[in-house]
Image (cartoon, helix red, strand yellow):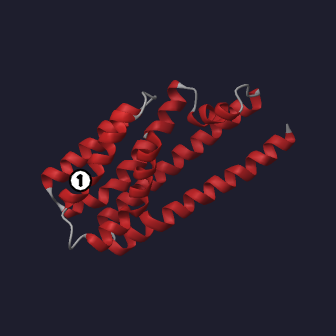
């Protein structure tokens, strides 16, 4: 069930900028708040307790509550900023309180990581944290100063393309690091 909810949130995140762009005239911000809030609430109630899961859900639900109460279309554009800041927090706090998030993910596949891999996963976690910081800043700038079409293009297409490039680039670097060790 939690995988289905995670998929629902992922799909909602992917479609969100387009729904805002094409549906802003027909759908009220309260509709978006209700839909996102229901997904986040269901996730919070069904996901096993994991580091950061409760406060991430609480922050997202808080945003949905604000969006629903204020019913202001301009707030719709802040959701991608929030998501990036939450991901930045998740990656950044894992660096501080360890183990780094990328190391945790790597240990799912390879429980006994060599020292070089542990150092590498820390560096990759830092790169992802920097990416989410820059992505949040760019999404915020587009929210404040750009036309809705630019915001939708960046948050709905370009940001995911950049994420894919970063993921692919990291995979290529990882192959070289593995070959060298």
- Residue 5, given in percent of the width and then of the height, sits at 41, 45
- What is the tally of numbered marks visible in this picture? 1
- In the foreground, 171 or 132: 171
Look at the image and tell me in which quarter the N terminus lies. Answer: top left
70 shown above or below 100: below
| Residue at (43% x, 65% y) in the render | 156
> Label 1, on which residue?
33
Q: Residue furthest right?
A: 180
On the question of residue 21 being in view, the answer is: yes
On the question of residue 88 being in view, the answer is: no
Q: Secondary structure at mark 1?
A: helix
Query: Based on the displayed image, in which of its 4 quarters is residue 47 positioned?
Result: top left
| Residue at (37% x, 69% y) in the render | 18
| Residue at (75% x, 27% y) in the render | 115
98 shown above or below 56: above
Look at the image and tell me in which quarter the C terminus lies. Answer: top right
| Residue at (71% x, 50% y) in the render | 171
- Residue 84, given in percent of the width and then of the height, sits at 42, 49
112 shown above or below 172: above
In this rendering, position of residue 61 left or right of residue 104: left
- In the foreground, 172 or 138: 172
- In the foreground, 6 or 159: 6
Query: Based on the displayed image, in which of its 4 quarters is residue 71 positioned?
Result: bottom left
- In the foreground, 150 or 6: 6
In this rendering, position of residue 45 left or right of residue 27: right
Query: Based on the displayed image, in which of its 4 quarters is residue 56 positioned?
Result: top left
- Residue 105, given in percent of the width and then of the height, sits at 61, 36
């Amino acid at each position: 069930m939690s995988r289905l909810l995670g998929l629902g949130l992922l799909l909602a995140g992917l479609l969100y900028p387009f729904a805002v762009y094409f549906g802003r005239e027909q759908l009220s911000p309260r509709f978006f708040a209700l839909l996102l809030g229901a997904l986040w609430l269901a996730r919070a109630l069904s996901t096993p307790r994991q580091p950061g899961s409760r406060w991430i859900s609480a922050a997202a639900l808080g945003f949905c509550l604000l969006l629903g109460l204020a019913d202001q279309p301009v707030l719709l554009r802040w959701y991608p900023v929030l998501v990036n800041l939450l991901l930045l927090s998740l990656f950044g706090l894992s660096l501080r309180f360890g183990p780094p998030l990328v190391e945790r993910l790597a240990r799912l596949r390879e429980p006994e990581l060599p020292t070089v891999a542990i150092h590498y996963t820390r560096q990759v976690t830092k790169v992802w944290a920097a990416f989410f910081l820059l992505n949040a800043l760019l999404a915020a700038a587009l929210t404040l100063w750009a036309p809705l079409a630019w915001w939708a293009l960046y948050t709905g297409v370009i940001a995911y393309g950049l994420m894919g490039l970063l993921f692919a680039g990291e995979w290529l670097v990882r192959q070289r690091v593995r070959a060298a060790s």
